[in-house]
Amino acid sequence: MGADLWRIESLLDAADVSDRIEGLLAIGVRPRQLSVRTLLVGVLLAVADDRPAHLCRVHRALLALDDEDRRRLGVVVTWRTGEHLLTYRQVERTFALVCRALAREHPDGTPSTALCRVLDAICEASVPERLKKASSLAIDWTDHVSHARPATTTTSSKDDEAAWGHRTGGPAKGELFFGYYLSTATMVRDEGGARVAELTRRMVLTSCRHDPVPPLVAVLGTMAASVDINDVLCDSGYAHRRAERFALPLRRLGARLVMDLHPHDRGTRGTHLGALCHNGNLYCPATPGPLLAISPLPRGASKDDVAAHDLRCDELSRYKLGRISRDDADGYHRVMCPAVMGKLRCPLRESSMTLPLRLPEILEPPALPPVCCVQATITVPVTVNAKTAQLHDYPSRAHRVSFARRTAVERGYSTLKDPASTDTTRGWCRVMGLTAVSLLLACAIVVRNHRILDAFEERQADDARRAAAGVEPRSRRRKRRGIDEILEAAA
């Protein structure tokens, strides 16, 4: 308990949110016994002890502290009539005041600016300073069921901001639920970089009646003011949004997108100056049709199928117009004909016909060459492939390997909903309203980050000891554990 208390207080002091919230609360007739800082300490202690985030358990966690800490935190104070021990009613009252101060004046199912700042500060404080340089993020949203029952024809719901939504993954995909969408941004390693602890760095909760993508984009925009965002990995749920709602704002922040394209966005989607707009890139108008029909690998593909698929993707890349400049202030860039770049042979480019015969050759060039075949380079405006442009060619091996890092955010949700630890499924908290649930979920995310960080540092220390002893690092693959091994570890 002492170590957890010290860690929690250090986090709240680093986040510097307690005084900020206190400044928003109205001054009553007499000072409140329970401060905002002590309230947050109690919530974090309750969640860290794998208790449900009930306010009565928050009260018990504060009462369970030793006498010195209780007096220091104001759980026990001296009044004119003698010593007074904190009551549950005081916990409930202070929590209600905090939620009222951070909520919108007219709640609409989206977080207020004040609430977003508090959540950002709490999540960021759980990331150690030495790990803040990790700038690649995996983003996703999941369902969070409200404790309230939905409204019926005869009764209204106790949670006015909750709404009906659809689960987007797992065996219950497409199933309806009543509650909120929880969106998070989880740290992942940079391409070719060292492993990092998969800590949740940002979170935002929205009602299911709203699209969860724009609020998370706004949170990432605030984050970019102090952190250089590198890669952003997301599934087709984000990639299928209108470009001005997701892709363009993130590119303006300097993010490099790695996305799984939605089936409706895959394939050839028009042309630009004669070049084919295909899967986020521009290709030669004479690109063979079978190469343009390449689809992502199915799950469980054999090694031979993978090798053949990657070989076809490499062949397709030779027909791609290569980028020769960065985006300017307006998002424009220039690309060059693949024959001019020496990637294939084309009769329309006489100099390319001297290239080695092992390179692909355009046998039937366009009878009326378009602009991309007449000019060596063309300018590509930001509106071309605005939704689908990304870091790697889709669905090449480089894209597949880079996109595999996105599973970090899924592991984050699995630990949040783990029945053996922080089980945030329905019943975990009994409060209603977006602001109240957001504060409790932020505390659960902080506790989860602490556990992930401890496990990561333990593995790093174990690998360092093994390297010093000349022993290979422990395998990350799971192995079967027998009864004897489990009992021995417990002893």
Image (cartoon, rainbow, N blue to C red):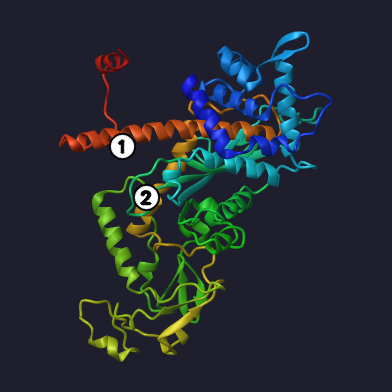
426 to 380, vertically: above or below: above
Q: Is the residue marked by circle 2 packed among few (<14), some (14-19), or many (20+) residues within 10 Å?
A: few
Q: Where residue 48 appears, x then y in whole percent?
A: 51, 24
The residue nearer to you, when weighing 13 against 440, is 13
The three-letter code of the residue at mark 1 reads Gln
353 to 402, vertically: above or below: below
Measure the alpha-carbon separation of dots 1 and 2. Answer: 34 Å
**Residue bearing the label numbered 2:** 298
Q: State which quarter of the image contains the C terminus.
A: top left
Residue 178 in sight in this render: no
Mark nearer the N terminus (1 vs 2): 2
The residue nearer to you, when weighing 48 against 54, is 48
User: Image quadrant of residue 109?
Assistant: top right
User: Image quadrant of residue 198?
Assistant: top left
> Which residue is painted at 27% across and 54% down in the image?
305
| Residue 460 - label | 1
> Which residue is painted at 72% across and 38% down in the image?
102
Q: Locate residue 211 relative to residue 65 in the image: left or right.
A: right
User: Image quadrant of residue 112?
Assistant: top right
Secondary-structure class at tag 1: helix
Residue 402 in sight in this render: yes
